[in-house]
Image: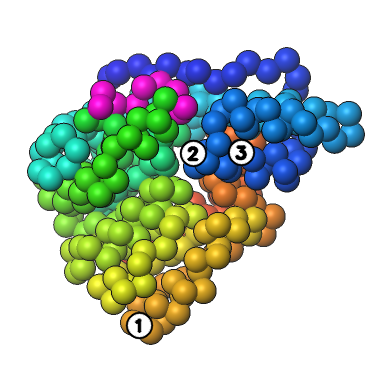
Amino acid sequence: MTAVLDHSPKHDVDIEDLEIDQRVYDLYDQYCHGFISRREFLKRAGAITVAGVSGLTMAQALFPRYAEAQTISFTDERMKAQYVTYDSPGGNGGEMRGYLAVPEMAGPHPAVLVVHENRGLNPYIEDVARRLAVAGFLALAPDALYPVGGYPGNDDDGRSLQKGLDRTKIMIDMLNGAKFVQSHSLSNGKLGAVGFCFGGGVVNFLATKMGSDFHAGVPFYGSAPPADSVANITAPLMIQAAENDDRINAQWPDFEAALKANGVEYERHLYPGTGHGFHNNSTKRFNEAAADLAWERTLAFFDTNLSV
């Protein structure tokens, strides 16, 4: 199994109880989505001081610490995980690689595609795949960056690599990943998908694209699909949303109207006091109570909709 380097910054202060100013969170969101560079993020944050605490300290505390965030070890006896390659016609490279996590118990299992954020298959997303496997799901987490060498070991370079890829072809690569895990010999044929940020948008895309071959979608703070494509959705959706996420929440009224107009089964959970990325336990954006509740709901939703 390929080792992934942890380029998490080292901190000279105790960040566990550090309060992050909302302005720094907002800057981090711009940085994460590629609207400003890392240098610009740190520069702007450094101009903020709250109660004697530098915004630069707050900014540095937001960078991911993957080694500390692992919840399921890759050696956990309840599952087995490995990297697999598969054909991806029409995608960015014709072949894709993903992280496949298989429950130790005998199959077949419900299949779930796990879709990363806008920076490739980092350790947090691999951990999410393992969490699903120990819960009884056959989980595949594709790496959109595989055609350009794969996740490079740090999010900054990963973000740049993903931005340079053809987005339409990324969607095809993810669609091919969904088909691969659904047709796997250990799959029961039912397919769900969960994704985060960019990955949440991919979940919505798959729901509009796969019709009756798609059985349950859980987008975490993902972009809404075009309204005219919502009529193609036949699977139930569980939409996980953060209260303080203006960019994504601004899309909700039109998305909800389209869901209602087309009779799509859905439920939306808005988590008070949370921001974009609240499920990601590698950064200070993590909200443990909301993340735990959202994950409990996600697993129950998949149990209900992916059982044979």
Tell me the quarter of the image containing the C terminus: bottom left
For marks 2 and 1, give the CA distance: 35 Å
Mark 3 or mark 1: which is in front?
3
Tell me the quarter of the image containing the N terminus: top left
Residue at coordinates 30% horizontally, 59% vertically from top-left? 205
71 falls in the magenta region: no
- Where residue 298 appears, as percent x and y from the top left, is 44, 57
- Where residue 293 appears, as percent x and y from the top left, is 56, 55
The residue beneath circle 1 is: 263
Residue at coordinates 38% horizontally, 48% vertically from top-left? 199
Badge 3: how crowded within 10 Å, few (<14), some, or many (20+)? many
Q: Tell me where the magenta segment starts and ends, as one range.
A: 148-156
Residue at coordinates 61% horizontally, 38% vertically from top-left? 28
Q: From what the image shows, is residue 71 above or below residue 11?
A: below
Q: Nearer the viewer, residue 126 or 165?
A: 165
For marks 3 and 1, give the CA distance: 37 Å
As shown in the figure, which amino acid type bears the numbered disc 1?
Gly
Of the two numbered discs 3 and 1 on the same chain, state the one appearing first in sequence: 3
Mark 3 or mark 2: which is in front?
2
Q: From what the image shows, is residue 2 above or below residue 198?
A: above
Of the two numbered discs 3 and 2 on the same chain, state the one appearing first in sequence: 3
